[in-house]
Amino acid sequence: MTSVLPLWFEIGSMIVLVAILVIDLLLIVRRPHVPSMREASLWVGFYVLLALIFAGSIYLLGDVQHGTEFLAGWLTEYSLSIDNLFVFVLILASFKVPSAYQQRALMIGIVLALVFRGLFILAGAAIIERFIAVFFIFGAWLIWTAWQQIKPGQEDHGGDSWVVRQAKKVMPISDEYDGGKLRTTVDGKRMWTPFMLVLISLGTTDLLFALDSIPAIFGITKSPFIVFTANVFALMGLRQLYFLLGGLLERLEYLKYGIAAILAFIGVKLILHALHENELPFINGGEHVPVPEIDIWFSLGFIVAAMAVATILSLVKANREARSRGEHLHLGAAEHREEQ
């Protein structure tokens, strides 16, 4: 696939982004702690600003089309990552991960998400290059996933999944954590700590979310570079966002409806595009189907509106419920946990 962006910019961007992630990971390893509200806010603001600067760079070095595709892709992946983060919250609570080591678990989960998404991006780009009709499959999958988001009885995201249960059968697991270590010694016997189960659960979750996020962003852009960088920027700052939102995250009741609307919208967009570029002989005799195509600006507007409406309605309801209990709606995971 050809690109309108200079090769030096694409290579340089990858190097810088990987370096930032490595530095972020090293900071966690050297100083595990629960970040303050101010620290978390500054980091989240920094990563959002960095994404906007990156979008501006694409506008200047490439064109408006690719810059807009990055913004739409980044916002889509960011909304899906927040949904991913909500499941992370449930997993960490399920395994009772000590507060000081939650950052480490989150960062490893984010790195695993990048690895899985990177592999899916390479595979997806290769398939799309050779078989445009795969958009029918992607579109149907996203519409089905959207239904699963809002389907009753889909709230159970506990850590004791089938994969975790199988791991417990074959791996000796200690009852207690040993700091942030994966291995420990109990009565002279080497065992895995529950931290390993946490990572297995996070990795399994990442794999499942990658199945949704990659088709979704390929419905916005066919550039593997934009797909990957949008995913990186969506995941950067996610662990700080976890501590910033804290207990508020679980109160974003309508978030799943906003995400479902985005997934369904992109699913329809993919199917329309597949019909427009149709080459399947059993559809319209292998000829292109004259259907309307949804442009990138409309897509961007829909994504922003869906997330804004879902977030605002959730906050209004959460604030109303808090006031009815004589409480104040507040942010901050650290404070939220200390109260419990």
Image (spheres, grey):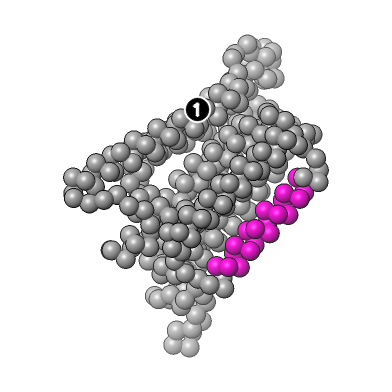
- Neighbor class of circle 1 (other Cα within 10 Å; few <14, some 14-19, many 20+) is some
Identify the main secondary structure in magenta: helix
SS of the residue at dot 1? helix
Quarter of the image with the C terminus in it: bottom left
Residue 149 falls in image quadrant: top left
Q: Determine the residue positioned at 67% across, 14% down.
A: 288
Q: Amino acid at mark 1?
A: Phe
Residue occupied by mark 1: 302
In this rendering, position of residue 260 left or right of residue 120:
left
**For residue 6: magenta?**
no
User: Residue 37's spot in the image, x, y percent?
Assistant: 42, 59
Asked if one can make out residue 37 in the rendered structure from this viewpoint, the answer is yes
From the viewer's perspective, is 147 left or right of 280?
left
- The reply to whether residue 206 is visible in this rendering is no
What residue do we see at 22% from left, 51% from top?
327
On-image quarter of the N terminus: top right
In reply to whether residue 13 is colored magenta, the answer given is yes
Identify the residue shown where x is 63% and y is 31%: 68
User: Which residue extends farthest bottom?
Assistant: 188
In the image, residue 5 lies at what x, y percent? 77, 37
- Residue 145 locus on image (x, y percent): 47, 36
The relative height of residue 340 versus residue 210 in the rendered view (above or below) is below
In the image, is residue 22 above or below residue 282?
below
Q: Which residues are magenta?
A: 10-28
